[in-house]
Image (spheres, coloured by chain):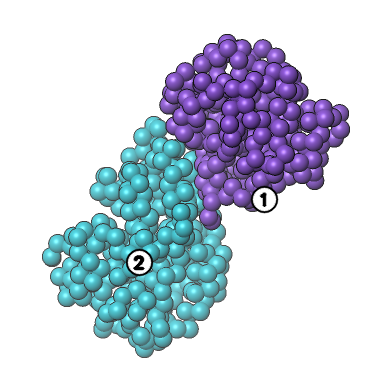
Chain colours: A cyan, B purple
Amino acid sequence: MVAATATMSGADIRRLSRSAEFSGQTSGVAAGYVQCNIVILPRDTADHFAQFCALNPKPCPLLAVSPEPGDYRLPDLGEDIDIRRDVPRYRIWRDGIFTEQCESIEQLWQQDWVAFALGCSFSFEEALIKSGIEVRNISEQCNVPMYRTNIDCTPAGPFEGKLVVSMRPMPASNAIEAIQICGRYPRVHGAPVHFGDPTLIGITDLQQPDFGDAVSVRPEDVPVFWACGVTPQVALEAAELPVAITHEPGHMLVTDLKNEELAGPL
Amino acid sequence: MVAATATMSGADIRRLSRSAEFSGQTSGVAAGYVQCNIVILPRDTADHFAQFCALNPKPCPLLAVSPEPGDYRLPDLGEDIDIRRDVPRYRIWRDGIFTEQCESIEQLWQQDWVAFALGCSFSFEEALIKSGIEVRNISEQCNVPMYRTNIDCTPAGPFEGKLVVSMRPMPASNAIEAIQICGRYPRVHGAPVHFGDPTLIGITDLQQPDFGDAVSVRPEDVPVFWACGVTPQVALEAAELPVAITHEPGHMLVTDLKNEELAGPL
C-alpha cells in the first residue's frame, strides 16, 4: 500500500484509493482538506434519511448529496469524485447488520442509490491543534473513543437511535477555547454536546468505548463530548434496510474543500 | 429612596443617583443598558492602571476613560455623565484600604483625577437570560458569588494581585452555550476562565465566597468561573495609593450604551 501523507491533496488521496493503492485510515492525511462520513441508501429511503440529518444536524451535518439517484459523483465536494471507488474502505450493511468490508462498491452500485456526505470531526481537530490545543487521540496516535449515549436522536421514518459521541479529554481552560472554536464549525458537528460527568449522558466507563480506542484521561482533564458521525450507522442498524453502504470508520472520503471554508465568522 | 426600575433608561438612573434619590444596587435596573465598574485615580498612576487593564483585559475590559485629567465627563458612554455624582454609591480607598462609602465624590474631586469605566457582567447575564439560560444569582435575587483565585494578574507598576472570579453554576449543556455567547462579549469579561473543580484555581469552598453571596449548586451543575470586575479593587489594595475611588460593588454606573452594541459577530 502506498503511503498517504499529510502533504498530499484530497485529489491525490482519492486517486490512490480509486486505484486500490491506498485503503487505510485518513486521519492526518491531506492536511487542510475536508473529510466526510458517507452513507449510501436506496432512493426510497433517502428522503427519510435527509429528514433524519435535518432533524439531527449535530451528529449528521449534511455537506453534500448525490445530484440524482444513481449518480455516483459529488460535484459539490470535488470535480472528479466517484463515490463508488474513492472511499478507502467501505462497510456493507444488510438488514441493519454490518456484514462485510470492501475497497470498492463499483460492482454493487445500483441505479437508485443516493450518497450522503456528512461533516467529520477531523476538520475541527485540525482547528483545535492550530490553536495549540492538544487532541489526545492524535497525541496517542489512535482512534478517538466513541460511546453510545442515553440521548435519543429525533426519529425520521425508519431512522432512529441513540446519539453517539466522541470524547476528547483536556483541561478546562482548553475546553473553554475548544467550545468557542467548534461553535464556528456547525457543519462539522459544532460545539460539544456535554462535558464532565459521563454518567449524566449514560456512559458508565470512559475506558470502555463502544467504538474506537480508549485514551488517557489525566487528573486535570475534563472529558468533552461531541456529537459523532457514527450516529447514522446506529440509525442504519435500526432501519434494517435490505442494503446500505457506509465508509469504514476512520476511512473517510477526502474532498477538495478546505477546512477553513467551513468556518463561520470569528 | 425612589425605586429604580428595569424600564427606566440609563439617563433616568443617573438623574436619580445625581439627585441622591437613588443609591441602591443596579442589578436588573435599566434593562438593556451597559453598566460599568469604575476606578478613579490620580493622573500620576493612571498610565500604569491603563497598562494593567491592557495586560489583563478579561478582568479589566476598558470601555472608556476621562477625556483629560480632571474632566468628570465620560462622553463615550453618555452625553451628560458626571462621574462625580452619577454612580449610586462610591468606595473611598486610602493607602490601599477601603475606608468609607459615599453617594457623591463632588467635594473630593481633584483636578488630576482620571476615571476608568470597565465592562461588567450584568451585560452578559442579560444575553444568557435571553437565550433561556438560568443565572442562579438572579433567580435567587442575590449578589453573584466572587472568589480570589491563585491566578496572578500581569502586574503594571504598582498594580498587581490575584484574579478575582465570579461563579455561576449551571448544567454542562447550558455552560457550553454560555461559553459561546460570552465569547462574543470580550468587552464585558468574555468567555469564562475556568469551569469544574474549584481547587484547580485555588478556591477551597464555593459556599464561602470572598465577595458577594453564596448561591445553591445543584447535583447536575458545573461551577463556571468568569474574570470579575472586582479584580482591579484587589490591585488597588496592592498599589496602596494615598487616595482612589471605586464604585461600591453592585452599584454601577449605568450608561447610554446598549448591551447588544457590545456583541461581536455571531
Q: Residue at x 50, y 51 (%)?
A: A193
Chain containing mark 1: B
Q: What mark, if any, has residue B74 been given in the picture?
A: none
- Looking at the image, residue A61 sits to the left or right of residue A104; the answer is right
Q: Mark 2 points at which residue?
A: A36
B60 vs A48: above or below: above
Farthest residue to the right: give it: B2
Farthest residue to the left: give it: A2
Location of residue A90 (image quadrant) = bottom left
B109 vs B169: above or below: above
- Looking at the image, residue B124 sits to the left or right of residue B54; the answer is right
- Looking at the image, residue A184 sits to the left or right of residue A100; the answer is right
- Circle 2 packing at 10 Å, graded few (<14), some (14-19), many (20+), is many
Q: Can residue B158 be seen in this view?
A: yes
Q: Is residue B209 visible?
A: no
Q: Position of residue B63 (x, y in %)?
A: 57, 39
* Residue A71 or residue B99, whichever sits in front: B99
